[in-house]
Structure formats: structure tokens, C-alpha cells
Amino acid sequence: MPFTHLPKFCFSRVTLTAAALLCVPLVFVPRYALAQSAKPIDPTTVVTAQPLSAASAPSAQSADSALQADYARRQKTIDKRTEENNYRFGVKQHDCYGNFFVNHCLSKARDEMRETRQEIRQDQITLDDEQRTERAKERDQQAAIKQAEYDAQAPQRAANEKANQQSFEDKQRQNALAAQRQAVALQRAANQAGHDRKQADYQKQLDDARARGVQDAQEREQKAERYEQKQRDAAQHRAEVDARQKEAACKQQEKHSRRSRKSSSVRNN
């Protein structure tokens, strides 16, 4: 566990007064109550690992659980010592403001707090080093176990690889045969498609020829009909022109006759 930075305590006079009021019950606690409460840990106490005896050594898993529990217990002890050190410094800092030599008292309390903090920090470093060493040991053991398992499985792995290679080659041959059959089928389908396309083109040409023949016959009939209609129209037009010419000649002749009669009448008179 990494070392945790400990915050500095800064008390104002109002805060110190409140802290003093809160701490009064702790000063006047009865003796029997103090006897039942947990004793504060000596700041000079060094936290070390307590190995299990060889007679009561459990299994590997139980030993690991016990070791982790011991690490947790030691970490809890360090955390508790840190809290007690901070608390004692706060109390001493508060008490110093009632002393005549305030700065000297505060400096001494701060030095004691820092000295205890350094001892706690050394214990924390020791615990962290032991945990890192244990984790490295566990990693090495796990790596050795995995390597042993890997080496033990080498014959089976070789057999599996050989079987996989044989299976791969069989699949490759099957895929080659399947690809060849597929290529033949595709070529056959392409040939059939080409034949069908030629037949369709030939049939389309026949249908187009028949359609053009029917269309040509219809056009010839239409042309003949239009020619006959033109002939009829021309004959009718000539008849109308002849009729108009005859009518005009008659009118001209009648007009000439009237003039002749009129001239004769004038001469007779």
C-alpha cells in the first residue's frame, strides 16, 4: 500500500476552544472505563510480520489467506497509529496556546509528531516492500506453474498440431475438388447461357423479320390506298374544273348573246 500523505492540522482559537470542550469528557473518564477501552499504540513500536509456526502451518491457500489477513491487520494498525498521532498533535497544539512559550511548545509538539510520522512511514515502507515481494513471488510461482503446464502439454500439443495440419490438408484438397467442380459447373452454365442467348437472338431476329414484313405489307397497302385516293381526288378535281369551265363558258356565251340582242335592238330603233 503506498504511503498516504498526512494532512497538517491548523486550529483557530474558536476551533481550539471547541476542541477543548469536546475533549473534556476524555479527560474526566472514570478509571474503570479507561481500563475497558483500547490502549493506544506505542509510537515507538515497530510493526513486523508474525510468521506462523511450522507445527500449525495450513495449506498453501490457507497460508496465503493468513498472510493477507496479517497484511490487513498491520495496515489497520498503521492507519490507527496515524490517526492517534494526528489526534495527539492536535491536542498538544491546542494545549500549547495556554503555555507561556507558545512557539517553543508548538515546535516541540510538531517535532514529536513528525518523528512519530517518520517511524510510521518506515513501517509503511516495510509493509509495502513485503507486499511487493510477496506479489512478485506469487507472480514467479504462477509463471513457473504455467511454464510447467505448458511443457507437460507439449506432446499433446504436438499431436494436436499434427492432427490440425492433417485436417487442414484434407480440407485444402476438399476445397480444391469443390472449386474444380464449381468451375466445371460454372463453365457448363456459361455455355448453356451462351446457347440460350444465341437461340434468343435468333428467335428475336425471326420475330423482327416477321414484324418488318407485316409492317412493310401494311405500308404498301397504305401507299396504294393513298395513291388511289390521290387518283380519285385528281379525277374529281378535273371534273370540278371542267364543270366550272363549262359554266363559265355558258355564262360568257349568254352574256355575249344578251349584248348582241341589245345591239340589234338599238340598231332597229
Image (cartoon, rainbow, N blue to C red):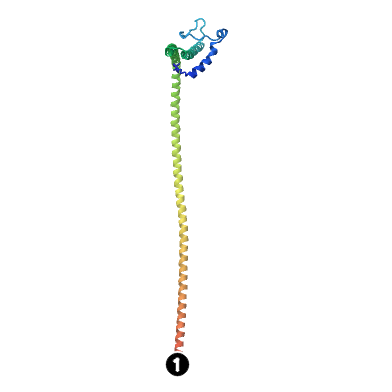
Task: Look at 47% across and 53% down and name the residue there.
Answer: 207
Q: How many marks?
A: 1
Mark 1 residue crowding within 10 angstroms, few (<14) / some (14–19) / many (20+): few
Q: In the image shown, does 6 or 236 lie closer to the viewer?
A: 6
Task: Look at 44% across and 21% down and name the residue there.
Answer: 161
Badge 1 marks a residue whose secondary structure is helix
Q: In the image shown, does 128 or 251 lie closer to the viewer?
A: 128
User: For the view shown, which residue lies furthest in the front direction?
Assistant: 100
Task: Name above or below for residue 230 compared with residue 149.
Answer: below
Spot occupied by residue 196 in the image (x, y as percentages of width and height)? 46, 45
Task: Look at 54% across and 12% down and name the residue there.
Answer: 26
Q: Is residue 34 left or right of residue 105?
A: right
Spot occupied by residue 187 in the image (x, y as percentages of width and height)? 43, 39
Task: Look at 46% across and 58% down and name the residue there.
Answer: 215
Asked whether residue 125 appears in the rendered view, the answer is: no
Query: Which quadrant would the N terminus be assigned to in this image?
Result: top left
User: For the view shown, which residue lies furthest in the top direction?
Assistant: 55
Spot occupied by residue 113 in the image (x, y as percentages of width and height)? 44, 12
Q: Pointer 1: what residue?
A: 266
The quadrant in which residue 230 appears is bottom left
Spot occupied by residue 71 in the image (x, y as percentages of width and height)? 48, 12
Asked whether residue 20 appears in the rendered view, the answer is: yes
Task: Name above or below for residue 152 compared with residue 240.
Answer: above
Q: In the image shown, does 107 or 150 lie closer to the viewer?
A: 107
Q: In the image shown, does 214 or 14 lie closer to the viewer?
A: 14
Q: Amino acid at mark 1?
A: Val
Task: Name above or below for residue 232 compared with residue 202.
Answer: below
Query: Which quadrant would the C terminus be assigned to in this image?
Result: bottom left
